[in-house]
Amino acid sequence: MEPTENIADKHTRAELDLPELYQCVHCGLCLNACPTYRALRIESESPRGRIHLVRAAAEGRIELNQGFADHLNLCLMCRACETACPSGVKYGRIAEAARAAIGPPGSKLARGVASLAFTRLLPFPSRLRLAARLLRFYQRSGAERVAGKILPRRLREMSAMLPAVPDRFFAPEAEVFPPLGARRARVGMLGGCVMSVLFAEIDEATLRVLRKNGCEVVLPRNQGCCGALNVHNGETIAAKEMARRNIDAFLAFELDAIIVNAAGCGAAMKEYGHLLRDDAAYAEKAERFAARVKDAGEFLFELGIVAPSAGVHIAVTYQDPCHLAHGQKVRSQPRALLQAIPGIELIEMNTPDRCCGSAGIYNITHSEMSQELLEEKMRSIAATGAAAVVAPNPGCMLQLRYGARRYGPAVEVFHLMDLLDRAYGAS
């Protein structure tokens, strides 16, 4: 969707006129928490500046043009400003509403590709698995090596960021898995879109860890992508339909919690109530669903984990995924679980909750800024001397693995569930 030349549409203007716009007192405490402001020192590339722009647009004082879109799209949506804000401004809601008005970022071609992915690929698990199989063929047929010699530099970099597609995906035939031992809880588990095809081993590890901790685990067959990438990039129509699908799939079961092992997915699902607030048929169900959503580490900490029996002797540092630390306010729980594993030495890095530059598809749409933040992050990791970094989010893991190859240090990158699974003696 092309950014419009002006806000002639009163409906669009009303959708931007959120209560959060008027909570901001322009104190500036968000400035140094914002990655783009720290890098550029430009007011319009800060949360405070962007809020001012959205408010001006909502009031009809400025046009909803390409300049407006550029400022909003340069934001990583990391929500570090929400942590810093003394007034409790939910900046993410403001930015998501603005992006819904301007559409996906990038050139006309890029927006078309993004729209295709958001509406014709992510909502359909079978299509996503087919795309992953094609990517796997591309990687293993030799075509990737040939492409690496002839593609333009930017496309070569994008290809280098891709993980190796595994031999199998996470798509269990069973829908209910019994606990290993006495039952302590009955939980649902999101398989996810990217997680299930690119990180199947992490989904499998999560399932084993939950069962080891006395959870009966339900994997509803009708579940699908959570819609997080859609919401963050201004595509809310399909996102709402994806949310409805998951609400129906999970609420069909009596569950104590709905477990998510990807930070961005968890943050989006905890906000289904806001996403569907105007849907008379789903508003109440969405709030009920959101109240049950728990990050895997958050849930296991609250449940009280079964003491791991095997040692994992490695020094690690922990990277706070933005949508876990800032979006869900989950910080101490994953660290406590790591420290419960025999042999783990946790070494904190400087500013572990600064964005690594992944931010969904940001490392594709805004490569230069993304790489600047990634290089900064890798320096912080290097300073710890740790042999590995733990980051419970697929986007962060992809970004940090690329950073380890391009900038060093050559650290391993783990999900929290990887290490817990090892500590329980899994193969």
Image (cartoon, rainbow, N blue to C red):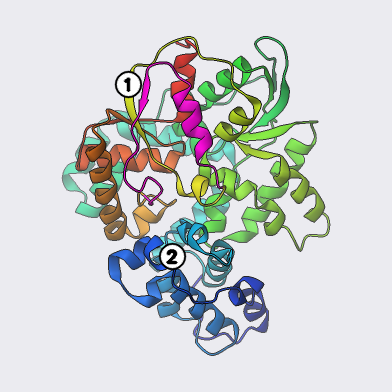
Identity of the residue drawn at 44% across and 68% down: 29
The residue tagged 2 is: 105
Vertical position of residue 390 compared to residue 270: above or below: above
Give the residue at mark 1. Answer: 314
User: Which quarter of the picture shows residue 184?
Assistant: top right
Whether residue 230 appears in magenta in the rendering, the answer is: no
Q: Is residue 152 visible?
A: no
Q: In the rendered view, does 50 fall on the left or right side of 90?
A: left
Amino acid type, label 2:
Pro
Q: Where residue 357 appears, x then y in whole percent?
A: 35, 52
Instruction: Return the x and y of residue 97 as percentages of the image width and height.
Output: 58, 68
Q: Is residue 200 shown left or right of residue 38?
A: right
| Residue 189 higher or lower than 63, as above or below | above
Segment colored magenta: 329-355
Q: Position of residue 369 (x, y in %)?
A: 30, 60
The disc, 1 or 2, on the residue closer to the chain's N-terminal end is: 2
284 versus 418 height, above or below: below
List the single residue furthest toward the left.
Answer: 149
Q: Position of residue 374 (x, y in %)?
A: 29, 49
In percent of the image, x 52 and y 39: which residue is there?
A: 262
The kind of residue on which mark 1 rests is: Ile
Dot 2 falls on a residue whose secondary structure is loop
Q: Who is closer to the viewer here, 11 or 25?
A: 25
Classify mark 1: helix, strand or loop. Answer: strand
In the rendered image of this protein, does residue 227 appear above or below residue 100?
above
Mark 1 vs mark 2, foreground winner is 1
Task: Please identify the quadrant where the C terminus is shown.
Answer: top left
Residue 352 lies left or right of residue 239; in this view the side is left
Say which residue appears at 44% left-offset and 78% top-offset.
Answer: 68
**Res 170 quadrant in image:** top right
Question: Is residue 425 something one can see in this rendering?
Answer: yes
